[in-house]
Amino acid sequence: MMKKIVCLLLVTLAAGSFFAGAANRDSSKLKFHVLLSGRPLLSALSARDSVKNFMYSHNQLEVQVSYKKHQIGFGFDAGYTKSTDLINNLPRAFTKQSTFFSPHYAYKFYQQKKWSAFVGVGYYVNTIDSKVTVTSPIEVVTNQTTQTEEGSTLFLRANYKFTRRFSIEFETAFYRSRERIEEIKDYSLTPSLSSAKSTYRDFRTYAFPSNVWLKYSF
């Protein structure tokens, strides 16, 4: 996962340098930014799942365009894992694929020396597809789960600038979400045992902090 994030960051930095050069010809107020989440590093340094439990944001990488006090951002993340083991001496395969996308708008309402603050609203979609397959000499049993969470967020960010280009940004947010879980169980030899069901739930989540960002500005 971290290799993918680093690759995306390098590509975004290269693209941002190009667009930033073009922007400078039009307006000195138009700026581009790349943010990399500190959540993976904090998770690696802390107890298992402790960071995940209170840092709710799924964003790993975010690109922003700002003009004066206005800012538009796009956060995204993706992942894929695959593993195998044995259950009752039968091979079992696990696959998991996730995608996340979150556009948002923010307004800078405070600016004082090295500190600045933003308030914003956004929309996000997080999808996780999981599949477990158990293969026996006579039958293949597959359990597939698709979890889709979408909703809106109201957030507050505080930014501290180390240099003209590098800064750190702390985020706290309120999430209002709707989650849909679809579960399909398939028996290849005895389809009468196969089943499918969907469940829904609405929930609200407040996270402090929801993310910590390392920010590079062009």
Image: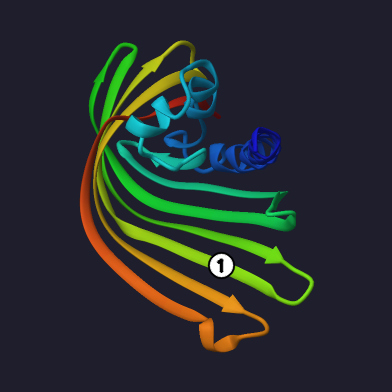
In the picture, the quarter occupied by the C terminus is top right
User: At 49% from the left edge and 12% from the top edge, which residue is drawn?
Assistant: 163
Looking at the image, residue 2 sits to the left or right of residue 217; the answer is right
Q: In the rendered view of the protein, which quadrant contains the N terminus?
A: top right
* Label 1 secondary element: strand
Left or right: 82 as drawn, with respect to 67: right
Left or right: residue 39 versus residue 150 is: right
Task: Spot the residue most to the front.
Answer: 88
User: On the image, numbered disc 1 is attached to which residue?
Assistant: 143
Identified by mark 1, the residue type is: Asn
Figure check: 57 above or below 191 = above
Q: Position of residue 102 (x, y in %)?
A: 42, 52
Residue furthest out toward the bottom: 192
93 and 193: which is toward the camera: 193
Q: Position of residue 171 (x, y in %)?
A: 32, 30
Q: 93 or 45: nearer the eye?
A: 93
